[in-house]
Image (tube, grey):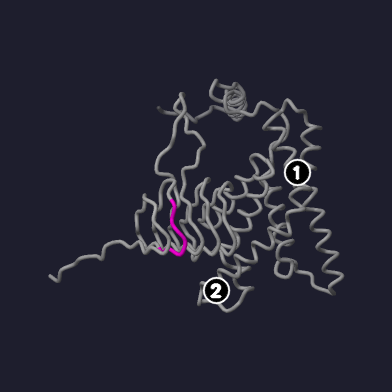
């Protein structure tokens, strides 16, 4: 298709600009059946990704104030600043939870969603100390598993797994509290930043470590015990899906269970609702679709080569 951009006068060009823009706007504002199907029923505000970024910045400040609060002073001053950050977090979080609830169920009304948002934000604020405790176990596990560092601060400030776990542990608590939409936004932001893809529905125990991290995938129904270590490229995924009568996947347990003290090396793929017993080592590049008992060593066959 050829386009003729030559106009005989500036007035004609101006008229063409207006005509093209108006025509495009008319077509864009006329919803197709597919657009109507996926467009939110509510006309209220959607959760803001920019606000979620601010929330996560505040979460980091609350979790690791010594590392993410640039102002330092007496203990009393630091406690006061922590209080201000926690209150800002509560107010922003309650607002975004309210937006998410209203979009999920507009029939409840915006005021009802806003009130529920406040209630759920308070639940999350009460859980912050436990989230912090879990994150510090993760930092300890990373420190214990990585001879390349001798500094906890280096881990907290620069390691991508800490960034991913702050997002995951916070999002997981939101999901447990019944908050829609926001948990997935939060973990996908970490996925974009780090290459570590952890579904907020996964259950992960204490002292969890990921070394390097790029390409790690942890599915929604995974259950991971305590003192588990994963290396880059590990996939804990589903082997297949159960479909309903309309051909849509059903959300049933379909991802692996890793018991305590399991180590999974780089690029291993573990699929399906299988159990990897405690104190097991899964070697690099292994493809595993069957359960293994505790104290196992799962290794791929040694490469065979000939000298030419």
Which sits in the foreground, 175 or 54?
Answer: 175
**Where residue 229 sits: x, y (%)?**
49, 64
Q: Is residue 84 left or right of residue 67?
A: right
**Where residue 143 sits: x, y (%)?**
56, 73
Few, some or many residues within 10 Å of mark 2 (<14, 14–19, 20+): few
Q: Is residue 75 left or right of residue 276?
A: right
Q: Is residue 63 left or right of residue 194?
A: right
Q: Is residue 287 above or below residue 249?
A: below
Q: Is residue 61 above or below residue 44?
A: below
Q: Marks 1/2: CA distance?
A: 35 Å
Is 188 part of what is drawn in magenta? no
Is 277 part of what is drawn in magenta? yes
Which residue is labeled 2 in the image?
A: 144
* Res. 12 visible in picture: no
User: Which one is earlier in the sequence, the residue at label 1 or at label 2?
Assistant: 1
Mark drawn on residue 120? 1
| Image: magenta residue range | 275-281
> Mark 1: which secondary structure?
helix
């Amino acid at each position: 298709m050829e386009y003729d951009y030559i106009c005989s006068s500036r007035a004609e060009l101006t008229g063409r600009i207006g005509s093209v823009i108006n025509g495009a706007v008319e077509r864009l504002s006329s919803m197709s059946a597919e657009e109507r199907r996926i467009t939110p029923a509510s006309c209220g505000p959607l959760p803001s990704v920019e606000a979620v970024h601010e929330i996560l910045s505040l979460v980091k400040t609350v979790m690791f104030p010594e590392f993410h609060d640039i102002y330092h002073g007496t203990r009393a001053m630091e406690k006061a600043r922590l209080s201000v950050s926690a209150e800002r977090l509560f107010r922003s979080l309650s607002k975004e939870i309210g937006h998410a609830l209203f979009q999920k169920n507009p029939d409840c009304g915006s005021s009802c969603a806003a009130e529920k948002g406040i209630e759920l934000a308070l639940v999350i604020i009460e859980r912050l100390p436990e989230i912090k405790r879990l994150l510090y176990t993760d930092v300890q596990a990373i420190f214990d598993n990585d001879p390349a560092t001798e500094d906890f601060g280096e881990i907290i400030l620069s390691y991508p797994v800490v960034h991913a776990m702050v997002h995951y542990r916070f999002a997981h608590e939101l999901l447990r509290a019944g908050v829609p939409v926001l948990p997935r936004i939060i973990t996908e932001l970490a996925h974009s930043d780090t290459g570590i893809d952890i579904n907020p529905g996964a259950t992960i125990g204490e002292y969890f470590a990921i070394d390097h991290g790029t390409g790690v995938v942890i599915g929604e129904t995974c259950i991971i015990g305590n003192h588990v270590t994963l290396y880059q490229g590990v996939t804990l995924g589903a082997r297949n899906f159960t479909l309903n009568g309309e051909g849509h996947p059903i959300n049933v347990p379909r991802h692996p269970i890793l018991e305590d003290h399991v180590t999974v090396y780089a690029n291993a793929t573990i699929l399906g609702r299988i159990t990897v017993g405690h104190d097991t080592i899964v070697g690099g590049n292994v493809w595993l679709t069957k359960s293994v008992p505790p104290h196992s060593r799962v290794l791929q066959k040694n490469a065979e080569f000939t000298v030419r």
